[in-house]
Image (cartoon, helix red, strand yellow):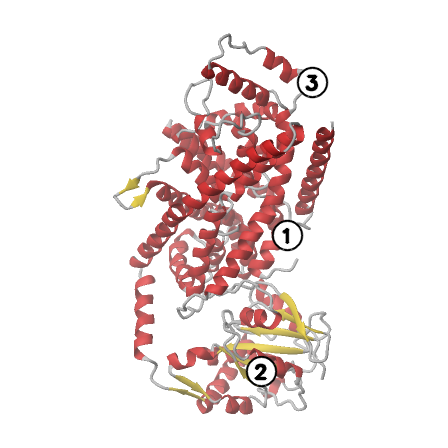
Amino acid sequence: MSIQKIALVGNPNSGKSSVFNQLTGLNQHVGNYPGVTVDKKTGSFPGKEGGKIKVIDLPGIYSIYPKSEDERVVFEILKDKGHKNYPDLCVVVVDVTNLERNLLLFTQLHDLKIPTILVVNMVDLLEGEGISVDLEKLSELLGGVPVIPMNARKGEGIEALKNAIYDFNQTTWTPFLKQYATHDHGLKHLPSPSEQIEDTDRRFKKITQILKFCVKRAEPSKSRKLISNRIDKVVTHPIWGYAIFLFILLLIFQAIYELASVPMDLIDNVFLLLSQGTRDALPPGVFTDLIAEGIVPGIGGIVIFVPQIVLLFAFIAILEETGYMSRVVFIMDRLMRPFGLNGKSVVPLISGVACAIPAIMATRTIDQWKDRLITIMVTPLTSCSARLPVYTLLIALVVPDKSVWGFMNLQGLVLLGMYLLGFAAAFLAAIIFKLIIRSRQKSFLIMEMPTYKIPRWSNVGITLWEKTKVFVWEAGRVIMAISIILWVLASYGPPNRIEKAVSAIPIPENVADDAKMSYEEQVSSVKLENSWIGLLGKQLEPAIAPLGYDWQVGIALITSFAAREVFVSSMATIYSVGEDFEDEATMLQRMRQEVNPRTGQSVYNLASGLSLMVFYAFAMQCMSTLAIVKRETKSWKWPLLQLVYMTTLAYIGAFITYNLLQ
Amino acid sequence: MIQGILVVILFLIASFYLGRMIYGELSGKGKHCDNCAVKDRGIKS
């Protein structure tokens, strides 16, 4: 039998994605965190005699009977032998420490006459759990199905699995339950709920009997069990659990500030030198100006935040790897229930801290459509990594760098506050949407607590590399394009307008350095003000002046509409255009020096800075998220509503913040 | 003169790239979101 296409199937968190990575050599994201895969992933590996064997990694499911969107993905493929992704062979991955529950799905697939190989994963945990499994006996009792032991995280057993796939040749088939024996044509029609329950019950009874013959449980290692239970008792405690989570968040944000400051300063200075170097190396002219004032500061404005993004993703990856993230999901479920959020909304909301797009995809696990919609609508309020550069730039501008209670950095505390504000806004918005969408159905989060594991540092490293690459490459290309357009629009204006405005500035009579500098500053300011983008910013100014922003911030608000992170690079470009590069001021220094001509005060003070942060915390400045919401809801109605409500919330929130602090 | 031409060319390329990206995202063929979604959640568009 020649195998062309195999599907990886199994319960959530059984290690399918690890098996997928080992088989295909790809580096798909793997977490010690249920629900990492919510749709199929595909890859391939070489066949024994040339050619490729296609591998499809399907979302984790507990039973073949679908309840939610991700389970339906599996059902749709496996129910119909005519489906284009119907596999020649199913590799069913089971967690060896929980065979009883994991084998249910295997028996259902086996009875659908789908050729199967059983991968008994996480065998490295057997010793610690005090379990021994007679795999030969298990294979025999399951009708001669090949059983392969594996430790997929480390790749142990992968060759045995490949050989089993190459040599697979099923000649006989013994049904697990007899009433499915005639089921030759796929699962075209779902059994009724009562039949499903009866079927499941009968399967569990038989599985329990089989496992009595082949699994021996010694008294588990007391110390290991005790340690695990003790940790869980504390980290999921109704009070201490939250305190610990808050403390961990606090540590993360403190570390983001403390550890990232040195590389950030270094990057800032490198880009300043690059700008100056470009100007020195190239002949004078507009193209040189474009590179030195537009492209280099624009790219530098985003690269400077790479150390912080890397740290944020590193902490998230470590929390996922250790298994702590699942405990966070558990305690957050308790916190979110009073707000009417579905238990399964927790994973998307927590994932939203990294990026709203995969988080919105993760709502596919929510079976009730109204609950799913509410989660989609509120998830972009959680602070994603693209907001981090905006927050840190503004915090560095307006929040003093000083210690609180002797050991905490005030700037780190404010950053933590912004993330908590995002969660609070999501919870409150959920209450309102619950009333509007009128979802009264209750559902519960049932999830497995994975065992605590030492993080695989190689996996953390790969995740960091991939995420950073995506951040720099994806955001970098957009930023480069916007920087070029912005520089041109900031350097040119309607015919003769800039020249007229500049000639109206009185030339200082004395040649003292101060007077000369003041004149040059006025010239560059007037040039920008009368440029195309300056005129656009000026048009917007009346609308944003109540929030404490000037027209330059208005420009950055417009350019960052497509993606929040563009805000920082836009500011960098705006404050570089026409600047004298002998003045070695970094972007932050230039922004600090900015004075509002009307009030005579600094443009970026505590009131306007926090107002701007609140605006970015709530505003839907992400086109990709809107596109994904449209794709998931199959309508433009919901993303447009999201855009309107979030922008309104941002405006009102920023207005209140500015006026309270002013 | 040459520098001016280079600026115009870069400006046109940047405008085209940005326009294509915006159109791509809004018409559901966006690559930006797919890239990270595939990596994070295994989504195939």
Mark in front: 3 vs 1: 3
Q: Quadrant of the C terminus of chain A?
A: top left
Q: Nearer the viewer, residue A596 or A143?
A: A596
Type of the residue with mark 2: Ala
Q: Earlier in the sequence, mark 2 or mark 1?
A: 2
Local secondary structure at mark 3:
loop
Say which of B16 and A656 sits in front: B16
Q: Secondary structure at mark 1?
A: helix
In the figure, residue A579 lies in which quadrant? top right
**Residue position marked by numbered label 2 in the rendering:** A160
Residue under the image location 40 percent in, 82 percent down: A127
Residue picked out by circle 1? A631
Name the subunit of mark 1: A
Q: Is residue A180 above or below residue A414?
A: below
In which quadrant is the N terminus of chain A drawn?
bottom right
Describe the element under mark 2 as helix, strand or loop. helix
Q: Residue at x 56, y 73 (%)?
A: A19
Position of residue A515 measured from the top left corner of the image (x, y, whole percent): 47, 14
Q: Residues within 10 Å of mark 1 (few under 14, many from 20)?
A: some
Frontmost of labels 2 and 1 is 2
Tell which subunit mark 2 falls on: A
The residue labelled by disc 3 is A495
